Amino acid sequence: MAGPSIPSPPLDRRGFLQRIGRGGLGAALVAAPGGGFAAGQARSSQSLRGTLEARVAATGARGEARVWWSVDTDERVVGLTFDDGPHPDLTPQVLEILARYEVRASFFAIGALVEAHPELLAQVHEAGHEVGNHTYHHVSAERMDRDDVLATVERGADAVAEVLGDRPRWFRPVKGHVTGAVLRAAARVGHDLAIWSVSRGPRTSSDTDVDAVRDHLTTHHHEGAIVMLHDGVGRSALDPFGQSARLERRRATELAVLPEVIERWLADGYRLVTLSELVDQHHRPGRPPLDGSGGSAGDGRAAPAAGDAVATSLD
Ligand SMILES: [Zn+2]
């Protein structure tokens, strides 16, 4: 049942996460049932097989979920992505900047905000950008049980479908936290998972340090990178008492540098594309995606701390 990218010998969950986190160049193909994720490698006793089959029957999860941090290519292409919208202030600003440079991106929308601002999501789509699912209410999977994870993924997909007609192809877990429940839910809904290889920079950079954010983004991009920025403020947009001035400052900083960052990438010969174009037209299949070689180091694919989540961000 192991996909071509799952290493052997058997790994426990922590070891598996460390492997796929370290080898962030490319994608991991993960068998959907939770049992296969944790214990399914090469151990094929009848009792284990029976346990796994029972879990599959219980969850309804079948098939596979692909997880992408970046794609393996020598071409100068970058998949630019924006999380946490739609947001009445930030999303139109991002759309205007992207239109100015005639580039396409992928937007990971929060379902509850899609319901609040369906016209903004429609604008994103009509401008030629791709829309993905970023859960319904933006709570990390680490804080939910399996059923709640599935519910927020399905409801997020349905919120997008309500506006655009179809459930989106792509899913990005909150804070990049990939758990067994996330993989199961993504497989069940039929999502591919997109994490990222480049974000706005390390946590140590000041929230409003324009130079640090710009310099990070213009020195860490690489062939096949998935870059994660924001057109929203995460969960604080859903909580009238939880407005985060800090997050708003961080977002303002990202927006302030975005035009210059795009100009620098374009001057470097890079093209900016949607995730689907990046993966479908530029990923070079066949190379083991977990070897971790090649490319320049992106912050998002550093080894995860303490073997916990695969990729994390402050947001
Ligand atoms: Zn988010």
Image (spheres, helix red, strand yellow):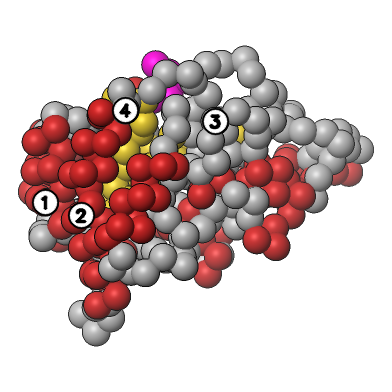
Q: Secondary structure at mark 2?
A: helix
Mark found first going from the N terminus, 1 or 4: 1
Q: Is residue 244 above or below residue 134?
A: below
Vertical comparison of 202 with 260: above or below: below
Q: Which residue, as the protein is rendered here, is positioned at the far right?
A: 45
Callout 3: CB less than 8 Å from ligand 1: no
Q: Callout 3 environment at 10 Å: few (<14), some (14 to 19), or many (20+)?
A: some
Name which residue type carries label 4: Asp
- Where residue 186 sits: x, y (%)? 49, 43
How many other residues sit within 10 Å of disc 1, few (<14), some (14-19) or many (≥20)?
A: some
Q: CA distance from mark 4 to mark 2?
A: 20 Å
User: Which label sits on residue 295?
Assistant: 3
Q: Residue at x 10, y 60 (%)?
A: 89
From the image, state whether disc 3 or disc 4 is nearer to you.
Answer: 4
Displayed quadrant of residue 207 = bottom left
Q: Amino acid at mark 3?
A: Gly
Quadrant in which the N terminus is drawn: top right
Q: Is residue 140 left or right of residue 105?
A: right
Closer to the eye: label 1 or 4: 4
Q: CA distance from mark 3 to mark 4?
A: 15 Å
Boundaries of the magenta span: 278-283
Contact? badges 1 and 2 (CB < 8 Å)? yes
Q: Residue at x 20, y 54 (%)?
A: 255
Distance (Cα) linking label 3 and label 1: 31 Å
Residue on which the image places disc 2: 255
Give the numbered dot on residue 93.
1
Q: Disc 1 versus disc 2: distance between alpha carbons?
A: 8 Å
Mark 1: amino acid: Gln
User: Is 257 displayed left or right of 178 in the figure?
Assistant: left
Query: Residue 268: which disc?
Result: 4
Q: Which of the two discs, 4 and 2, labels the residue nearer the N terminus?
A: 2
- Foreground disc of the pair 3, 1: 3
